[in-house]
Image (cartoon, grey):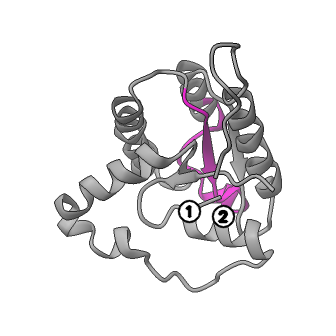
Amino acid sequence: MREYKVVVLGSGGVGKSALTVQFVTGSFIEKYDPTIEDFYRKEIEQFASMRDLYIKNGQGFILVYSLVNQQSFQDIKPMRDQIIRVKRYERVPMILVGNKVDLEGEREVSYGEGKALAEEWSCPFMETSAKNKASVDELFAEIVRQMNYAAQPTGDEGCCSACVIL
């Protein structure tokens, strides 16, 4: 069985853990319990090298923003730049995700804004809801497709084995 290393990035509270847990266990975490990076956000310098390490070892990237938080949409742009810097190439398996589509009435980021940014980055775009499980399975299936496509041998190298760390 193949393993895939998927890195899920985004601001605190956008639903990174909720999306991952929904995919893996099929359940939604109602209570928000910040993960380490969120918890130590003020001490981010300590974790900058840790994020570089996640990126270096990652094979596919899911960039998540909350569509009810415009700032979280702005925050993902430098994260994508960091991925390109660490990986040293432009074509990295990546998906841009607007999460919390179940809160449509509170939307701050339009579908068009997300779609336009994804087109600028030449990557797929999806809107999801970890709460309602809307497009969650499709999201992870798509990142696996992207990674499989990127891992296709070009003829010069052997086939590579991959590794899923979320």
Magenta-tinted stretch: 92-112
Where residue 49 appears, as percent x and y from the top left, is: 26, 53
Residue behind mark 2: 19
Where residue 48 appears, as percent x and y from the top left, is: 25, 54
Name the secondary structure under disc 1. Answer: helix
Q: Amino acid at mark 2?
A: Leu
* 19 displayed left or right of 40: right
Task: Establish if 17 lies above or below 69.
Answer: below
> Would you call the spot at circle 2 few (<14 residues within 10 Å), some (14-19), or many (20 or more)?
many
Task: Establish if 22 lies above or below 49.
Answer: below
Where residue 87 appears, as percent x and y from the top left, is: 41, 32
Task: Establish if 47 lies above or below 118.
Answer: below
Instruction: Name the disc covering residue 150, or none.
Output: none
Residue behind mark 1: 16
Q: CA distance from mark 2 to mark 1?
A: 5 Å
The C terminus is located in which quarter?
bottom right
Name the secondary structure under disc 2. Answer: helix
Q: Residue at x 76, y 79 (%)?
A: 27
Q: Nearer the viewer, residue 23 or 162?
A: 162
